């Protein structure tokens, strides 16, 4: 399943727009911090990865540091196991009415998505989780990081959950 962009919400957390140089500096600092600290950084107790996409309008490489969750999808309905070749990320945007830019970039250029994790750069295929699979993933995510549940309370938008599956063998 490809990336599915759900409709924008009508309510949610409002982000103050900073001047472009300030935003660039903030994103640059997060990129440098991730490069320096990598696996030691956490958000809400979750390990981080750096997502690399291509800008939907600009065509320029963009980076975002995100918390990730294990992919506990299963091949059979009876037992879930953690997959070593895929990661789950949440396009919460802290409960804003709008989707995060990285998600829109991914939807526009799904064939040009990479992650940096464990000092490796891996090309990934993004896939939106839907239906019962999304519901199982959401329950797992909110049990590991309860703040994500509060993000959903802040907005009426359906918060996308995306599986990032390694495109080729990377071990």
Image: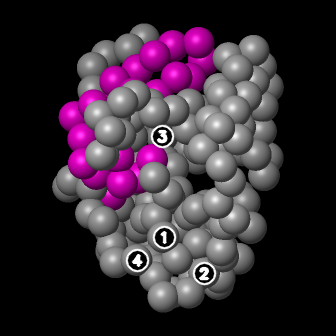
In space, the residues marked 1 and 3 are separated at their CA atoms by 23 Å
Picture coordinates of residue 130 (x, y %)? 32, 68
In space, the residues marked 3 and 4 are separated at their CA atoms by 24 Å
Secondary element under disc 1, as helix, strand or loop, is loop
* Residue 139 colored in magenta in the image: no
Q: Which residues are magenta?
A: 102-128
State the image quarter where residue 50 is shown: top right
Secondary element under disc 2, as helix, strand or loop, is loop
Picture coordinates of residue 133 (x, y %)? 37, 66
Could you tell which of marks 1 and 4 lies nearer the N-terminus?
A: 4
Could you tell which of marks 3 and 4 lies nearer the N-terminus?
A: 4
Picture coordinates of residue 36 (x, y %)? 75, 15
Which residue matches tag 1?
Answer: 98
Mark 4 in CB contact with mark 2 (< 8 angstroms):
no
Could you tell which of marks 1 and 2 lies nearer the N-terminus?
A: 2
Asked if one can make out residue 69 in the rendered structure from this viewpoint, the answer is yes
Could you tell which of marks 1 and 3 lies nearer the N-terminus?
A: 3
**Numbered marks: total:** 4
Mark number, residue 87: 3
Which residue matches tag 4?
Answer: 8
Which residue matches tag 2?
Answer: 12
The residue at 29%/34% (across/down) is 59
Assess disc 3: are there few (<14), some (14-19) or many (≥20) residues with their C-alpha within 10 Å of its C-alpha: many
The residue at 65%/38% (across/down) is 21
Q: Is residue 30 left or right of residue 166?
A: right
Mark 1 in CB contact with mark 2 (< 8 angstroms):
yes
State the image quarter where residue 40 is shown: top right
Q: Is residue 158 above or below residue 64?
A: below
The residue at 42%/11% (across/down) is 171
């Amino acid at each position: 399943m490809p990336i599915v962009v759900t409709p924008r919400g009508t309510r949610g957390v409002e982000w103050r727009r900073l001047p472009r140089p300030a935003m660039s500096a903030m994103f640059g600092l997060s990129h440098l911090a991730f490069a320096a600290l990598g696996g030691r950084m956490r958000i809400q107790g979750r390990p981080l990865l750096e997502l690399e996409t291509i800008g939907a309008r600009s065509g320029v490489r963009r980076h975002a540091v995100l918390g990730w969750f294990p992919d506990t999808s299963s091949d059979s309905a009876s037992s879930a196991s953690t997959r070593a070749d895929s990661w789950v990320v949440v396009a919460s945007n802290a409960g804003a009415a709008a989707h995060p830019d990285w998600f829109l970039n991914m939807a526009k250029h799904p064939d040009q998505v990479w992650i940096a994790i464990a000092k490796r750069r891996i090309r990934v295929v993004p896939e939106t989780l839907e239906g019962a699979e999304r519901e199982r993933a959401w329950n797992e995510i909110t049990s590991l990081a309860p703040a994500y549940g509060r993000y959903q309370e802040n907005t009426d938008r359906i918060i996308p959950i995306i599986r990032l599956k390694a495109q080729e063998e990377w071990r």
